[in-house]
Image (cartoon, grey):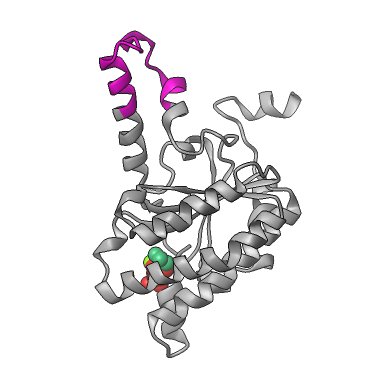
Amino acid sequence: MDGNGRWAQLQGKGRVAGHKAGVESVRACVSSARELGVKGLTLFAFSSENWQRPKEEVSVLMDLFMFVLTREVKRLHKNNIRFQLIGDKTRFSEKLQKKIVEAEQLTKNNDAMILSVAANYGGRWDISQASKKIAQLAVNGEVNVDDIDEHMLNKHINLSNLPELDLLIRTGGDYRISNFLLWQAAYAELYFTETLWPDFKEDAFKHALASFGDRERRFGKTGEQVRTK
Ligand code: IPE
Ligand code: MG
């Protein structure tokens, strides 16, 4: 979800206004995804590197996260959406951590869609934390080193409760993944758009899904193999 700051600047406003406007795009995309039957939607809200931003901006983002979580969790629950946070929770304030856990608990049995919010998240962190868990299991004698494979790693990496990642969207005109779902994106279709996040609403989201529908996914096979299947 990139481009909040630039959007605000174009309006002659401060960056905070961009983040607030971005919340409306979150709502639009979540409800659109839910209506269209998307099973999993993962939003990159705050990277492990975003802590390096000016203190005031970080603080506003945390307050906004707290505010939105408080305001929206009932609506998510009503729509049978499960909420989960992926990322290292321990760096958030105790109050925010509590809110996150409450939201996860309340919605844990919902099964229409899983909404994952990646916060204090990084793809490399994700792969490292999974490796650490497996190393500990090996030390405990619960895992054989020879049995460590992609499948095992996958089980300890975030979003293992979701199907394979299909589509990765980046708004804001930069053509990079920026440490998002590195492991999960192995076969994902990539969609880049110049649209700034606060302008990325239902129509833009549908446009991205339509583009996904036009792609030929070969998973290493030839085009002919896939088409004659
Ligand atoms: C994305 O918008 C929001 C977060 C990272 C929280 P930016 O804040 O990165 O907006 P730009 O890139 O400065 O326009
Ligand atoms: Mg940015």
Residue pictured at 70% horizontal, 47% vertical: 213
Considering depth in this image, is 78 or 40 the residue closer to the camera? 78
Q: Is residue 168 visible?
A: no
User: Where is residue 67 shown, x and y percent of the image?
Assistant: 49, 70
Against 39, residue 30 (above or below) is below
Quadrant where the C terminus sits is: top right
Against 183, residue 82 (above or below) is below
Q: Residue furthest bottom?
A: 12
Give the mark count.
0
Considering depth in this image, is 192 or 206 the residue closer to the camera? 206
Against 211, residue 153 (above or below) is above
Q: Is residue 64 visible?
A: yes
Main secondary structure of the magenta stretch? helix
Residue pictured at 35% horizontal, 47% vertical: 88
* Rendered-image quarter of ligand 2: bottom left
- Give the image quarter of residue 19: bottom left
Considering depth in this image, is 107 or 12 the residue closer to the camera? 107
Considering depth in this image, is 11 or 143 the residue closer to the camera? 143
- The span shown in magenta is 133-153
Residue pictured at 71% horizontal, 45% vertical: 112
Residue pictured at 55% horizontal, 47% vertical: 105
Is 151 colored magenta in this rendering?
yes
